[in-house]
Amino acid sequence: MLTMERIVFGFILFLTLISYDAQGQTRDLPDFKSLMRTAGPAVVNVISTRKAQTAAAGGSGASQREQDPMLEFFRRFMPDAPERGAPPRAGLGSGFIIREDGYILTNAHVVADFDDVNVRLADAKREFKAKVVGIDKRSDIALLKVEAHGLPTAKLGNSAKLEPGDWVAAIGSPFGFANTITAGIISAKGRSLPDEMYVPFIQTDVAVNPGNSGGPLLNLQGEVIGVNSLIYSGTGGYMGVSFAIPIEVALDVSRQLMSEGKVTRGRIGIAIQPVTKELARSFGLADPTGAIVINLEKGGPADRAGLKIGDVVLEWNGEAIDEPSELPRRVAATKPGGLAHVTVWREGKKQTLPLRVGEVPQEAIGTVRQELPKQETAELGMSMRELTPAERKVIGVDYGLVVVDIAERSGPGNTILPGDVIVGVNQRPFKNREEFESLVGSHKKGEMVALLVRRGEISLYVPVEIG
């Protein structure tokens, strides 16, 4: 059994060890008191009010959102919408002042769909009715304006200088408790989250809870390097994983909202897939980098520029695409109408194509799911048959082979499934069964080929080993 003396000795030893760095030099632990004194006054409490809903307004939205499984993982900090006939509800969030004449940054979900927004300053003595200048739901950023002058402003930093392990702090209003500070470290950078393709999130272990949303994430110099936005939670409360929007993204959005009232983003009309080791082997790439084009919008910017399905995008305007998630962010950051240069890997060679960037529409257009039938024949350890002319018309291909039986062999990760339609081998389409067999037959036993597959409404490459 541990004695009190041993416990005290162990605690003293622990404190001694953590006060030294890797080189054995004495190192003080961070002091957040000065940070709170300097940055705290610029942090505000955002109170959003929704009027009582009537039966005509419909209260079913809340129950539908509760059924959304993503809420168990990436739950926004704001309370759900009120039930039908409920009294007025208030949402609590945070924000920070970026200009002394009353411009404030917060999250879009803090103020979206609310009727009234009020801002309470950190001194708890002044409260202002806020005007919502603009909202960008894709980045989850909103810009507010209050009629005031000489307000304390946040010092803005640079998230690019962050490294995993750096100390950071969050100031906000968890559960409505204004001006609360919590601290932790950067866990990772450039995180991609479901349905959040435009934001390279900063992941931290800083304790944030409902009400912190929209508040600043700060470095030890008291500079804002992010906007707290999401938590990873099975309960709705803090579980050690939180996400912040990099300050550069937030400021770019705020500038566009201030000058134009909306945010414009570039688009090129493609769907992409990551390059695995097996697919890299199939395409003759030395490393699994870049993004494979698996679908092209007919007549879209990429199609007009000459990109093809199967091209591996390696660079955008001279910048390497190491991870596929980097491509949509860089495309989105390119001004619509501008000329970009995209470097692709096609049939063993690099090519650079000029491309005129389009604009992301304000409203996304949905697609119709397509079902594929099944039947007979065999190759590559699987049974296939040709698509009928009617089936080709339905899924929009000139020719394809539909898989009837499950493949006996396929590469790690994705596997061929019954109902898949094979439309290409490596980076080449084929017009008939003979061309398909010729493309596959040109590879030796043990080599990898990448089959371009249409599966329902998506396209993807599946690596298969020749057996």
Image (cartoon, rainbow, N blue to C red):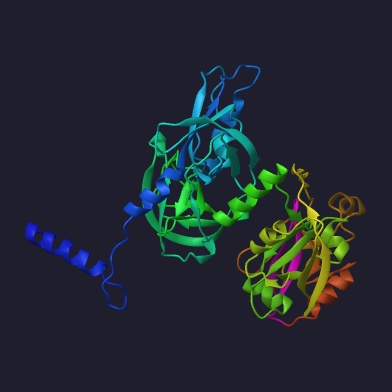
Q: Is residue 113 magenta?
A: no
- Establish if 58 lies above or below 420: above
| Residue for point 42% across, 59% down | 221
Identify the image quadrant of residue 55.
top right
Left or right of 400 in this view: 382? left
| Residue for point 68% across, 61% down | 330
Front-most of 93 and 343?
93
Q: Position of residue 399 (x, y in %)?
A: 88, 61
Write down the region rendered in magenta. Answer: 445-467
The tally of labels here is 0
Q: Main secondary structure of the magenta part?
A: strand
Q: Position of residue 214 (x, y in %)?
A: 51, 43
Front-most of 94 and 272?
94
- Establish if 380 lies above or below 371: below
- Establish if 180 lies above or below 381: above
Q: Is residue 462 magenta?
A: yes
Q: Residue furthest front?
A: 150
